[in-house]
Amino acid sequence: MSKKRKKTNTSQVRKRDNSPHNNPVLKKKYLKILERVCYQTDCETAFKLLSKDEKSNAFGHRVYVGTIKFENKEAVSKDALEFFTKYVQDFYAHSIYKLQPDREVELTNFEILVGLQFLTSLDNVTGERKNQLQIAFTPMRLKLGTLQETIKTIIYHYAITSNSTNIFSETLYNLKFDFNVKEYPTLGMHYFSTLEAVPCRSGNYIENGKLRKVFQLGYLDYGFTMNWVFVPVKSLQGVYRGDKKELPLCIQNHAYNRLFERLKPLSGIDIIHQLSYTLQTSLKIEIYKGNILIPYFHINLKCGYFLGVINKDRLIIKTFLFLTHHYTPEGDKLEKVLGLSKEEISYWKIGSLENFFGSNLETNHEMRKAFEDAGISHLFTVQSLGCEKEQRNYNWKALNEYINLGKTELFDEGAEDEILEELVEEGLDE
C-alpha cells in the first residue's frame, strides 16, 4: 500500500526583512538625533515640514561611525591601543573637538555629521519642493558649514593627534581617516578610523667611546603619509664636507629629555606638536661659532635651539639649549650684559622656561633692560602661551644684587661638580 504524499504549500512564505534599513526602532532613534540637530540649529520648525517619505530618505542617507580598526595590532602597545580607542570614541561622542564654525552650537561631532549628511540628502529632492527645503534649512547650513570642510577638519585633527604623540625613539602611530558610501551592513555614509604602527628609524652614534642610539625625525602629512625629514646640505653653509645633497635629521633621547625639562611647565604633547609643526613648515639651520643650531619656537615664542653635529652623513640633534644658555647668540649676549658664566646661569635657574612664568620685573628696571639688550625680553611674556602654573615669582632682586656685589659667592658644596658633569654630558664643556 503506497504512502500518501503530504501536500506542499505552494503559497510564498513571507520573509522578515531584518536589515537595519527597515528597522523601525533604529529609524526612530536616528530621526530623534536629526530632530535634536534641527533644534540646536534653529531649524525646529523646518523639521516639522518634512513628510514621512522625506524622513525615510534622510534615514536612508544616514551616518555610520565605525569603531577603530588596527592594521597591525600586534605592533600596537597597550597604552597606544587604549589611548587611540578612547580618542576616537570621544571625538564623535562629545563636543571637545569642535568641527562646526559656530562654536555656540551644542552638538557632538557625530550629530554634526548627521546634520551635514541630511543636508546633502536634500539634493535628491526635485522641483519646487527642493527649493523650499533648502530655504527652510538655511540656518543649519550657516551653523554647520559644509561636509567637505568638516571632513578636512577631521583629517586635520587626526594628523595633529598622531604628530603630537609621536616620539621618534619609539613605535610611531598613524591614525588614518576615511569615508565611503556603503550599502552593507548599514546603508549610508560610513566613516572609518584605522591605526597603523610604524617602526622608528634608528641607528648608532659613538661619542667619546660611548654608543648612543639616534632616531630619524619625521611627521605625518594630511594624506596620512610618513615624511622622514632630511636637511639640504646647502643650508649647512660649508660645515658638511661630504658628497650627499641632503642629510637625515636624527635626534638622541638626551635631546628629548632636555627639551621637556627646560620647557616646563609646557605639556609634552604641546611641545611635540610644536616640534612637528617646525619640521613641516619652518625648519631652519643657523651656524653660530661653528656650531649647528636649529631654532625652536613654541607658537610664536622663541625658546631656544637644538644643537646638532654631523656624523656619518647624518645631522644629529644632541641636546636642547634654552635661550639664556651659552653657545646661543642670545645667551652669549646675556653673558656679556650680566657677566654670568654658564655655571652661574644654571645655579640661578634662569636656564629654563619655568621661572619666567609669573615673573614681575616692573620694579626691576636693571634686570629687564639686561634681557632687552640681549634680545630675549619676550621670555617675560610666556603667560601668553596659556599654560597653567602656580604663580611663584622668581627672586630677580636677589640675582640683581648678586651681580652688583661682584658675584662674591656662588656655589654650595658639590654644585660646581654637578654642573660640570651636565656640561660634559652635553658636549659643551670648554
Image (spheres, grey):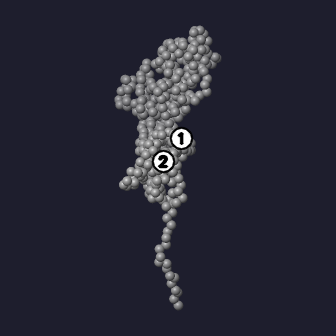
Rendered residue at 48%/25% (across/down):
301
| One can see residue 213 in this view | no
- Examine the rendered structure and indicate whether residue 14 appears above or below residue 207: below
Where residue 209 appears, as percent x and y from the top left, is 51, 27
Q: Position of residue 400 (x, y in %)?
A: 57, 13
Q: Is residue 56 above or below residue 143?
A: below
Which mark is nearer the camera, 2 or 1?
Answer: 2
Residue 15 can be seen in this image = yes
Gap between marks 2 and 1 measured at Cα: 23 Å
* SS type, badge 1: loop
Tally of numbered discs? 2
Q: Residue at x 51, y 42 (%)?
A: 105
Q: Is residue 202 above or below residue 64?
A: above
Instruction: Spot the residue most to the right.
Output: 413
Q: Which amino acid type is marked by label 2?
A: Cys
Residue at (43% x, 27% y) in the render: 310
For disc 2, the marked residue is 43
Tell me the element at label 2: loop
Q: Which residue sits furthest top?
A: 405
The residue indicated by pointer 1 is: 96
* Sooner in the amino-acid sequence: mark 2 or mark 1: 2
Residue 70, percent from left and from top: 50, 48
Residue density around tag 1, few if under 14, some if 14–19, many if 20 or more, within 10 Å: few
Looking at the image, which residue is at 37% across and 28% down?
233
| 424 relative position to 182: left or right | right
